[in-house]
Amino acid sequence: MPADWAIDYEAVERAKDTLEIELPTYFYIRKMKYWSGGCTHVPDEFDNLSYHVITIDSILDRKEASKCIWHELTHAWQCESLGQFMYDWTWHQHCRELGIETSGGRAKVYTPEYDLLPLEQEAAANEIKYNRRKLTKEN
């Protein structure tokens, strides 16, 4: 089932300016199995961060999709700010501290403890902070 909304790329560019995200960011809208969204940070052949890929679940309504994009853009900003290595290390370290099993850079299963990760709390705070600035439009 296709989403009844689309990404507002002009609004996304303004959001990237707000968060000071410099690298290209690509989006996919598709049905996701376990998560409502995700951000992958892609290194180049020299292991330098080169771009972000954000995937948003097509089943989300327009409002929730916009919040999800703010959430995932925050992760892109965190990765650029900390650097790829420190972002990954910080995420894995916090997962270990909370007893969250990881595999391939992702939590194996969602647990309520996942929301306690500092990187997740910051992203959730930005969902609320920027909630009025919609990043989606009617399809």
Image: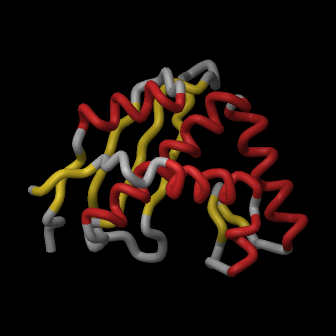
Residue 58 lies left or right of residue 32; in this view the side is: left
For the N terminus, the quadrant is bottom left
24 and 15: which is toward the camera: 15
Image quadrant of residue 76? top right
So how many labels did they put on this image?
0
How far across and how far down the image is residue 75, in percent?
58, 45
120 and 43: which is toward the camera: 120
Taking the spot 53% from the left edge, 32% from the top edge, the residue there is 19
For the C terminus, the quadrant is bottom left
How far across and how far down the image is residue 64, in percent?
36, 66
Residue 6 lies left or right of residue 66; in this view the side is: left
In the rendered image, the vertical position of residue 133 relative to residue 103, given as above or below: above
Name, please, the residue furthest toward the left: 139
Image quadrant of residue 111? bottom right
Image quadrant of residue 29? bottom left
Q: How is the image coloured?
A: secondary structure
51 and 75: which is toward the camera: 75
In the rendered image, the vertical position of residue 40 relative to residue 16, given as above or below: below
Name, please, the residue furthest toward the right: 97
Taking the spot 62% from the left edge, 29% from the top edge, the residue there is 80
Taking the spot 64% from the left edge, 58% from the top edge, the residue there is 104
How far across and how far down the image is residue 15, in percent?
41, 35
Residue 50 lies left or right of residue 54; in this view the side is: right
